[in-house]
Image (cartoon, rainbow, N blue to C red):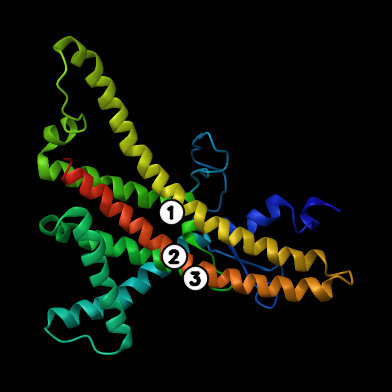
Amino acid sequence: MADHDDPFDAGHLIGHVKDAEYFEVPHAFALDGKLKVPQIRESSEPIATVQVPIEGLVEPFDLRITKFMCLEVIGAIILVVLFVPLANKIRSGGRPMGRLWNLLEAMLLFIRDEVARPAIGKHDADKFLPFLWTVFFFVLICNLLGMVPWAGSPTGAFATTGALGLMTVSGVVGGGMAKMGPVGFWTGQVPHMDLPFVLAILLKPMIFAIEVLGLFIKHFVLAVRLLANMMAGHLVLAVLIAFIAASAKSFAFVGVAPASILGATALSMLELFVAFLQAYIFCFLSALFIGMAVHPH
């Protein structure tokens, strides 16, 4: 059996959860089961490539529009549709009425009172709330889009989580420098130590380099953590569905198909919980890193 006919082939499985230039849809919508995304650049030749230790982690730069890009735009539109009317109601002094508005307001207050203020401090947290609120709901919506049939989870791509990590580290560095000044922020990366002058000249530059490297590594890990959790869940779902395809021509299909469907349903419920959990963790760690930057001691 050829690799592309093997439902358990690693490339075949990963192809279902990674970014692509098409949406996989029923054949009733497209003859080959692939709904192509319109492109602004016809050539698929990469303009530039980035070499990283993990092969395939960073795709070539080719200015091609992918399905995750489309879903991110959809996620941003959903944010605007939900929160602009809510903001207008609050600004005009009106009370949010209805289950949806109360749910959204409760979530916003939870992020403010249980995440931002404890991690950053009551006096500084409100400055970063717009960023934290936006990050939480954007990650949540992107995660939930992965539960929509024939869509996908944009947070299952490093391009998305890496961009979120870059925005977080920019907020951390920018917030720290705004609070303590550029010199104070960077010199504050080295903890105060009573060292002899000669030893300080040797050790402090090394500690500074380690601390700055650690600052960027923990944000890289923040991005990879979200990527790994979202991709892993969808990959396991793809494996469960592959059991059905693998047993389709045998008598085992009678038992394998119901078991796989029940397992996929149970795992989907878990993925729904993970979607909220990972959005909370990303928001919480972002707030924690910002708090460490504006209050280094």
Task: Quadrant for residue 119, please give it.
Answer: bottom left
Measured in 3D between alpha carbons, the distance from the residue under mark 3 to the one under mark 1, in whole angstroms, is 19 Å
Q: Decide: marks 3, 1 in contact (CB < 8 A)?
A: no
| Left or right: 238, with 94 as reference point | right
Question: Is 112 in front, or is 58?
Answer: 112
Looking at the image, is 274 positioned above or below residue 96? above
| Left or right: 111, with 265 as reference point | left
User: Where is residue 137 drawn, in percent x and y?
Assistant: 34, 67
Q: Residue 272 carries which label?
A: 3
Badge 1 element:
helix
User: Where is residue 151 drawn, in percent x and y?
Assistant: 55, 69
Question: Is 278 in front, or is 12?
Answer: 278
Badge 2 element:
helix
Task: Quadrant for residue 160, please give it.
Answer: bottom left
Q: Mark 2 points at which residue?
A: 142
Residue sitting at x 36%, y 52%: 164
Q: Say what amino acid the circle numbered 3 marks.
A: Leu
Residue sitting at x 57%, y 38%: 55
Looking at the image, is 146 positioned above or below residue 287? below
Q: Earlier in the sequence, mark 2 or mark 1?
A: 2
Measured in 3D between alpha carbons, the distance from the residue under mark 3 to the one under mark 2, in whole angstroms, is 12 Å
